[in-house]
Amino acid sequence: MNYQAAKQYYEREGHLQVPRKHVERIVGKDQKQRQLRLGAWIGNQRSRAATLTPERIEQLSAIGMRWV
């Protein structure tokens, strides 16, 4: 779900330089609207890059994640 929020943000804004306090609203598969703390999640992914799976790193890199 967080990846979908990141992808939505990237498609709208053209980058993943998300402010730490940003909340992204997305519609889930169950058609319910959710609010995700995307800024915090992106920051956590960056700080944990060394422990992420290669698949997760590739997935996020494909949508514009800057790791530094």
Image (tube, rainbow, N blue to C red):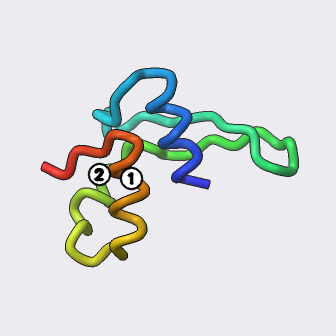
62 sits left or right of 7 in the view: left
Contact flag, marks 1 and 2 (Cβ < 8 Å): no
Mark seen at residue 31: none
Mark 2 neighbour class, 10 Å CA radius: few under 14, some 14 to 19, many 20 or more: some
Task: Write the residue at 33% across / 50% down.
Answer: 61
Q: In the image, residue 48 lies at what x, y percent?
A: 26, 68
Q: Quadrant of residue 65?
A: top left
Q: In the image, residue 3 lies at what x, y percent?
A: 52, 52
Element type where label 1 sits in the image: helix
Tag 2: amino acid:
Gly
Element type where label 2 sits in the image: helix
Mark 1 neighbour class, 10 Å CA radius: few under 14, some 14 to 19, many 20 or more: some
Q: In the image, residue 62 lies at what x, y percent?
A: 38, 47
Q: Which residue is mark 1?
A: 60
Q: Is residue 22 above or below residue 43?
A: above
Quadrant (top left, top right, bottom left, bottom right) of the N terminus = bottom right
Q: Is residue 23 above or below residue 58?
A: above
Task: Write the residue at 50% across / 22% down.
Answer: 12
58 sits left or right of 8 in the view: left
- For this orientation, the residue located farthest to the left is 68
Tag 1: amino acid:
Leu
Task: Write the residue at 19% across / 52% down.
Answer: 67
Task: Write the residue at 32% across / 60% down.
Answer: 45
Q: In the image, residue 2 lies at what x, y percent?
A: 54, 53
Give the Cα distance between marks 1 and 2: 12 Å
Q: Which residue is mark 2?
A: 43
